[in-house]
Image (cartoon, rainbow, N blue to C red):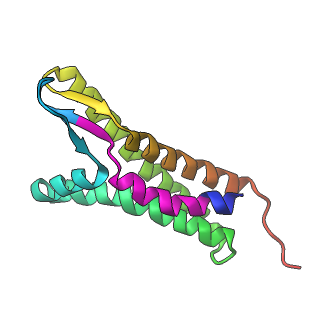
Amino acid sequence: MLRIANLSLLVLYPIAWFAPLMRAGLLPLFGLSEISVMTGLQSLWSSDIFLALLVTVFALFAPYLKTIGLALIHYDLLSPRVEKTLEVMGKLAMADIFLIALYITLTKGIGVGRIETAWGLYLFTFCILASLFISWKTQQSPPKTAN
């Protein structure tokens, strides 16, 4: 079951990256623009390359590489000793959820603009939390012995 759940994240992550995380607008009278992980990254690459690189690592590479690593462990293609490294990658991936929540809170506190969360934020959060759960359950499972 963990194998299937983990493999499903390989499909769900890219969907979450392109899904709208939030809708933002300057004033309530104007329309709202949808913001996804990818549109946010595109904007960052044109304005702040260092921050864009950090977000790319935390939002895209860390969770996806962790998921691939767990899949390799589940199919006995990678040593379980790597689980600690994958655990750290999962914690790094959780940092972007914190940043998104912080941006929403700050923007709502200013009162000039309008922000609405969208379904992609929930999907992205689900993917990160599911990955943490799968990692935890993988560590809980007894080591396989060769027969």
The structure residue drawn at horizontal position 25% and vertical position 45%, both measured from the top left corner, is 35
Please report the bounds of the magenta region as a residue range: 6-23
Name the outermost residue toward the right: 147
x and y percent of residue 123 in the render?
A: 45, 45
Look at the magenta stretch and give its main secondary structure: helix
Q: Is residue 138 left or right of residue 33?
A: right
The structure residue drawn at horizontal position 12% and vertical position 24%, both measured from the top left corner, is 29
How many marks the image carries: the answer is 0
- Tell whether position 40 is magenta: no
Quarter of the picture holding the N terminus: bottom right
Q: Is residue 27 left or right of residue 54?
A: left
Q: Name the one closer to the observer, 105 or 10.
A: 10
Q: Name the one closer to the observer, 112 or 86.
A: 112
Quarter of the picture holding the C terminus: bottom right
The structure residue drawn at horizontal position 40% and vertical position 52%, both measured from the top left corner, is 16
Q: Is residue 40 left or right of residue 89?
A: left
The structure residue drawn at horizontal position 25% and vertical position 30%, both measured from the top left corner, is 115
Q: Is residue 89 above or below residue 121?
A: below
Q: Name the one closer to the observer, 57 or 36.
A: 36
x and y percent of residue 114 in the render?
A: 20, 27
x and y percent of residue 5 in the render?
A: 63, 57
x and y percent of residue 140 in the render?
A: 73, 53
Q: Is residue 49 above or below residue 145?
A: above
Q: Is residue 112 left or right of residue 12?
A: left
- Tell whether position 17 is magenta: yes
